[in-house]
Image (cartoon, rainbow, N blue to C red):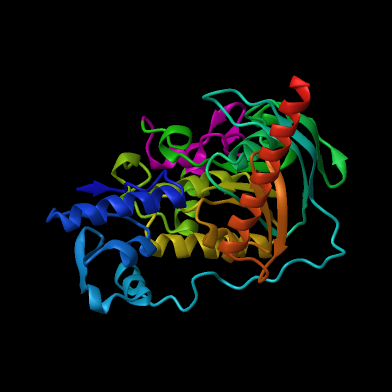
Amino acid sequence: MLDEPTASLSGVEVERLFQVLRRLKAQGKTMIFITHRLPEVLAICDRATVLRDGRVAAEIEREDFDEEQFIFAMSGQRLQRLYPPHEAPPAATPPLLSVRDLSIAGRFGVNRGVSGVSFDVKPGEILGLAGLLGSGRTEILHAIYGRIPYSGHIEMDGKPVGIRAASDALAAGIALLTEDRKRDGLLFNLPVGANITIGNLKPLSSHGMVRGDREKTAVLTAMRALNVKARSPQASVAHLSGGNQQKLLFARVLMSAPRVLLLDEPTKGVDAATRAEIYRLIVDLAQTGVALVVVASELEEVIGLADRCLVVADGRIVDQFLRGEGSEDKVLRSITAAQAQMQQAAVQAAKAGRA
C-alpha cells in the first residue's frame, strides 16, 4: 500500500518509482496506490476507486479511464476547464514588486543557494517560477518574505523596502503560503477558527484584547468565502481533509489583504476538486489587482496558470516565456542546457585554477 508516495518527488523520480512498480506488477504483486494526482492514476493504475466525503463515488476500469470522468466523480460537478482564463495586465503597467540581484548563500541541509535573481511582478499578474526540486524556487520566495537572509534589493511600487523578517514583509503588503502546511503552516494545538485569525488579531482587538464577536464574524466569513468544510470554528484541524487544511491556510494569508501573494506549492496534497477551487481563487485574486508568484513542482500547473513563467535552474533564472509559449519540454530543455553550461564553466574554472 502506497499512500501519496510521489508527494515530494520530482518528475524524473516519479518515473523511476513507476518503473519499480511495473516490475513488481510483473512479479505478481498487488498494490494499492493512493494519490491526489490524476495523471499518476492514468499512467499507472489498472482500476480506480474514487472516494468523496468518505464514501465511494465511482469505480472505474482501466478501459474507461477519462480525466473528466474522474473530476466529475471527485467533485460532483463537471469542470469545463482545468485552468481558468486570465488576461495578463497591459505591458505598460508599472511593476508592484521588483526584485533586483537577489542572492542567497547556500547552507547544506538548510537551503540551496541563489545567485543574481531579478524580476518584476505587475499588479494583477500571475508569475510562475518553473524548475525542478532543489532549483532554488522556494528559497526565492522565502527570501522575499524575510524568512532567510539574502543580499539584493526589493521594491514595492518603485520604493525600496527593507525586509529582514516576516513582520517586515507583512507590513509591506506581502504574504506567503508555505509549501509544507503541517510543518510550517497549521497549528494543531489550536482549533480551525484560531488557525485562521492567528497573525491577524490586531484588527479584531480593542485595547490589546481580542474581541470574541469580531473574531467569530471574521472566521465565519473566511470559511464561507473559501468553502472550508468543518463542523464548526472550534473543530480540530487534524480532522480536516488535506484540501480543507489548505483552504484554511489560504483564509489566513488572505485575511491581511496582501497586495503581493507568494504561493509555494499551493495545490500540494489536495484532490482534483479542491485544486480547481484553488486555481479559480488564484485567478480571482489576480483580477482584483493582487500580484501573485506561484511555485509548483508540476510544470503543467505553472505553465497553465501563469501569465509569464521564469525558468529557474541551480539558483539562477535561465529562461522565460509568456502564456501560450511554453511547454514542459521547453522548460526541461532550458534547464538541461543551463546545467550543461554551468558544468562546463565549472570545469574550465577548475582547469584554470590548476594552471
Q: Is residue 139 above or below residue 26?
A: above
Residue 355 position within the rendered picture, expressed as x and y whole percent measured from the top left:
78, 21
Q: Kindly identify the residue that appears in the image at 71 percent across and 47 percent down.
A: 317
- Tell me if 29 is positioned left or right of 255 in this view: left
Please name whichever residue, 156 or 327, is drawn nearer the observer in this view of the structure. Answer: 327
Residue 63 position within the rendered picture, expressed as x and y whole percent measured from the top left:
24, 78
Q: Kindly identify the residue that appears in the image at 42 percent across and 60 percent down.
A: 274
Q: Kindly identify the residue that appears in the image at 62 percent across and 62 percent down.
A: 330
Please name whichever residue, 326 or 170, is drawn nearer the observer in this view of the structure. Answer: 326
Residue 37 position within the rendered picture, expressed as x and y whole percent measured from the top left:
37, 59
Using the rendered image of the protein, determine whether residue 238 is visible from the camera's viewpoint.
yes
Please name whichever residue, 47 or 148, is drawn nearer the observer in this view of the structure. Answer: 47
Magenta includes 244? no
Using the rendered image of the protein, determine whether residue 305 is visible from the camera's viewpoint.
no
Please name whichever residue, 280 or 142, is drawn nearer the observer in this view of the structure. Answer: 142
Q: Which residues make up the magenta segment?
A: 189-215
Residue 12 position within the rendered picture, expressed as x and y whole percent measured from the top left:
45, 50
